[in-house]
């Protein structure tokens, strides 16, 4: 089941973008719920966002031979 979802997300650019954009939001909300309100929470979320987009671009370029943008 999880394998099918992963394969579907690999082929769907919108799903990839949603995952990359929602990951930092979930990270911020989760850390706030746990009681972490320091500025590093937002810095970590930004780093995760940028890192996930870079990784998505690299993986897409390797798979398709060119980046999506």
Image (cartoon, helix red, strand yellow):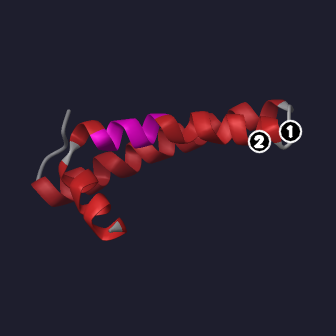
User: Considering the numbered disc 2 on the image, is that residue within a helix, a strand or a loop?
Assistant: helix
Task: Give the number of marks.
Answer: 2
Q: Mark 2 points at which residue?
A: 31
Which of the two labelled residues, at mark 1 and mark 2, occupies the earlier sequence position? 2
Highlighted range, magenta: 15-21
Q: Quadrant of residue 14?
A: top left
| Residue found at the very far front of the displayed protein | 1
**Foreground residue among 63 and 7:** 7
Q: Position of residue 24 (x, y in %)?
A: 58, 37
| Quadrant in the picture for the N terminus | bottom left
Q: Contact, CB < 8 Å: mark 1 with mark 2?
A: yes
Q: Where is residue 58 in the image (x, y as percent from the top left)?
A: 30, 52
Residue shown at the point (30%, 42%) measured from the top left: 15
The chief SS type of the magenta part is helix
Residue shown at the point (75%, 37%) measured from the top left: 41
Residue shown at the point (28%, 56%) measured from the top left: 59
| Residue 56 position (above or below residue 18) | below
| Quadrant in the picture for the C terminus | top left
Q: In which quarter of the image is residue 37?
A: top right
User: Considering the numbered disc 1 on the image, is that residue within a helix, a strand or a loop?
Assistant: loop
Gap in Å between the C-alphas at discs 1 and 2? 5 Å
User: Circle 1: is it few (<14), some (14-19), or many (20+) Cα within 10 Å?
Assistant: few
Q: Name the residue under label 1.
A: 36
Q: Position of residue 20 (x, y in %)?
A: 43, 41
Q: Position of residue 7 (x, y in %)?
A: 24, 62
| Residue 12 position (above or below residue 6) | above
| Residue 2 position (above or below residue 21) | below
In the image, which disc is placed on residue 13?
none
User: Circle 2: is it few (<14), some (14-19), or many (20+) Cα within 10 Å?
Assistant: some
Q: In which quarter of the image is residue 27?
A: top right
> Left or right: 51 with respect to 63?
right
Please tell me whether residue 18 belongs to the stretch shown in magenta. yes
């Amino acid at each position: 089941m999880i394998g099918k979802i992963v394969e579907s997300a690999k082929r769907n650019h919108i799903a990839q973008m949603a995952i990359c954009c929602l990951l930092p939001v979930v990270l911020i909300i989760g850390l706030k719920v746990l009681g972490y309100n320091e500025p590093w929470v937002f810095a970590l979320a930004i780093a995760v966002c940028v890192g996930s987009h870079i990784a998505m671009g690299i993986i897409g370029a390797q798979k398709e031979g060119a980046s999506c943008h």
